[in-house]
């Protein structure tokens, strides 16, 4: 390993001892971009890596809100403005009890390179709260979102920082957040948030974008391997926005998703999660106050495996779409033992670094999160463009642009890997392609 990369990884570990998820991503990205660092000795003198691992700004704040019984609660809110070299900070808001600084820093750091890969002018950011939306009423969600935005609004804006949804933040939450922003700022700046409803500036295809993008990327990889989606079986985890979009596109392309999962187990549906009734039921479940994956098994009469993950189920393609670190080395061994050839990351950092290494060493083609799931943020950036133009593209136009972007992400990653003699390593290729643009912009803008 290059001395410079090694030193920055060690220093980052020393400075952030309680942030394992962040350190995991830093190690993954920095070791991947080593060949670029070797080619650019000027980066060390400019302390480029030391700067890129340090967020430009971390905002932490109190969110006080009242439940339906009149009892007050306090949660912690965050926004991390990680890197604005190539555009306004852009990245989702996550509402989940597991949210902490380490998780948001890993997501924000990852977002820098993902956003760069999209070919669009957006910087990297992330935010959220340790608020748990499960079991809350609509009114409680609204009051929480209003309290959260009351503070967040002073840090964001259409040309400054543009948040979107993530786990626990969908169309309903974005609506409440935007309403509060508009009320306080007294201006119709709808480019300040993406993932909005269609009546107030949302983009067609945004809800589907991440899942559809996963499959558009997968299509490129399978084409590279002279293969196709048609007739393939897929194992998915999660049953939220990304899993729904992916299952929908898999069905459209003639494949079949046979599993979905939640925090308490997975469902095996050998007939496939295909057809309007099943796909719409995923949306219904996610919107329900007491959402639970078991509801699907009960409704459609299929197996529910309580407390288990789906990676032991045999399939051609594996796509985690839930949360971080759900594929460990042991789970990766199951995927390899099932004879899988493809693994695409719909969720962010769904696997440990050693699991990814094991999959690659055993002949599985890995599509990394920052490339595979970049369709969501890409259409968010297209939503920003439409908001500034005060004009909306048709669903076909947005879908065609999404398709082109996912193809560019794949092609640019493959080309970057080839340029540095790394074969068809899409993990290293994505890191290199994403990093190169941000590094050049940071160098051009002087010390900051
Ligand atoms: P949703 O909130 O719609 O769904 C989250 C899913 O993950 C649910 O099925 C949930 O199940 C499951 N889940 C959450 N936490 C855990 C946990 N600790 N253990 C097991 N399962 C869990 O989120 P999204 O679909 O939007 O996001 C899923 C992933 O995709 C995240 O990693 C997100 O960062 C990433 N992503 C999302 C994008 C988007 O556009 N939405 C864009 C790019 C990446 P349960 O309800 O049972 O907990």
Image (cartoon, grey):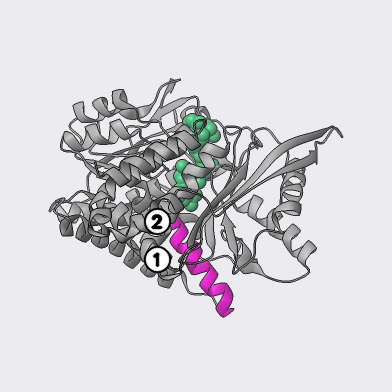
Give percent across and percent down for residue 30. 33, 46
Q: Is residue 47 left or right of residue 432?
A: right
Q: Residue at x 74, y 44 (%)?
A: 144
Overall secondary structure of the magenta stretch?
helix
Name the element at disc 1.
helix
Q: Residues within 10 Å of mark 2 (few under 14, many from 20)?
A: some
Name the element at disc 2.
helix
Q: Nearer the viewer, residue 249 or 151?
A: 151
Q: Quadrant of residue 161?
A: bottom right
Q: Which residues are magenta?
A: 373-390
Label 2, label 1: how many angstroms apart (C-alpha)? Answer: 8 Å
Give percent across and percent down for residue 432. 29, 55
Give percent across and percent down for residue 199. 64, 67
Q: Quadrant of residue 235?
A: top left
Q: Which residue is mark 2?
A: 48
| Disc 1 Cβ-to-ligand 1 distance below 8 Å | no
Q: Which residue is mark 1?
A: 443
Q: Is residue 365 left or right of residue 406?
A: left
Does residue 144 belong to the magenta stretch?
no
Q: Quick check: marks 2 and 1 in contact, CB under 8 Å?
A: yes
Q: How many marks?
A: 2
């Amino acid at each position: 390993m290059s001395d410079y990369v090694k030193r920055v990884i060690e220093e980052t570990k020393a400075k952030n001892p309680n942030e394992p998820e962040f350190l995991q991503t830093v190690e993954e990205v920095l070791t991947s971009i080593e060949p670029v660092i070797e080619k650019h000795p000027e980066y060390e003198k400019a302390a480029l890596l030391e700067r890129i691992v340090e967020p430009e700004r971390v905002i932490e704040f109190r969110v006080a809100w009242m439940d339906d019984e009149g009892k007050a609660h306090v949660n912690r809110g965050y926004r991390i403005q990680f890197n604005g070299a190539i555009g306004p900070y852009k990245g989702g808001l996550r509402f989940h009890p597991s949210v902490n600084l380490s998780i948001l820093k890993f997501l924000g750091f990852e977002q820098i390179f993902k956003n760069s890969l999209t070919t669009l002018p957006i910087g990297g950011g992330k935010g959220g709260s340790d608020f748990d939306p499960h079991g809350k009423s609509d009114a409680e969600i609204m009051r929480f979102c209003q309290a959260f935005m009351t503070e967040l609004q002073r840090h964001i804006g259409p040309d400054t920082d543009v948040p979107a949804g993530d786990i626990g933040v969908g169309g309903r939450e974005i609506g409440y957040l935007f309403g509060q922003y508009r009320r306080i700022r007294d201006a119709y700046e709808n480019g300040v948030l993406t993932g909005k409803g269609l009546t107030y500036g949302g983009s067609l295809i945004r809800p589907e974008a991440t899942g559809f993008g996963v499959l558009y990327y997968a299509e490129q990889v399978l084409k590279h391997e002279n293969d196709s989606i048609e007739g393939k079986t897929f194992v998915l985890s999660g049953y939220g926005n990304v899993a729904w979009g992916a299952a929908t596109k898999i069905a459209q392309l003639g494949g079949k998703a046979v599993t979905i999962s939640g925090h308490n187990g997975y469902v095996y549906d050998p007939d496939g999660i295909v057809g309007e009734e099943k796909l719409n039921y995923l949306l219904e479940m996610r919107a329900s106050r007491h959402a639970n994956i078991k509801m699907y098994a009960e409704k459609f009469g299929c197996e529910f495996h309580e407390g288990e993950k789906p990676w032991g189920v045999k399939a051609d393609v594996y796509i985690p779409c839930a949360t971080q670190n759900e594929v460990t080395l042991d789970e990766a061994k199951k995927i390899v033992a099932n004879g899988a050839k493809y693994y695409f990351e719909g969720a962010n950092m769904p696997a440990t670094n050693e699991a990814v290494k094991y999959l690659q060493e055993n002949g599985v083609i890995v599509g990394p999160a920052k490339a595979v799931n970049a369709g969501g943020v890409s259409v968010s950036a297209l939503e920003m463009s439409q908001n500034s133009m005060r004009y909306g593209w048709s669903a076909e136009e947005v879908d065609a642009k999404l398709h082109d972007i996912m193809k560019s992400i794949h092609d640019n990653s493959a080309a970057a890997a080839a340029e540095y003699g790394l074969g068809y390593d899409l993990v290293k290729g994505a890191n290199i392609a994403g990093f190169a643009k941000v590094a050049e912009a940071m160098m051009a803008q002087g010390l900051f």
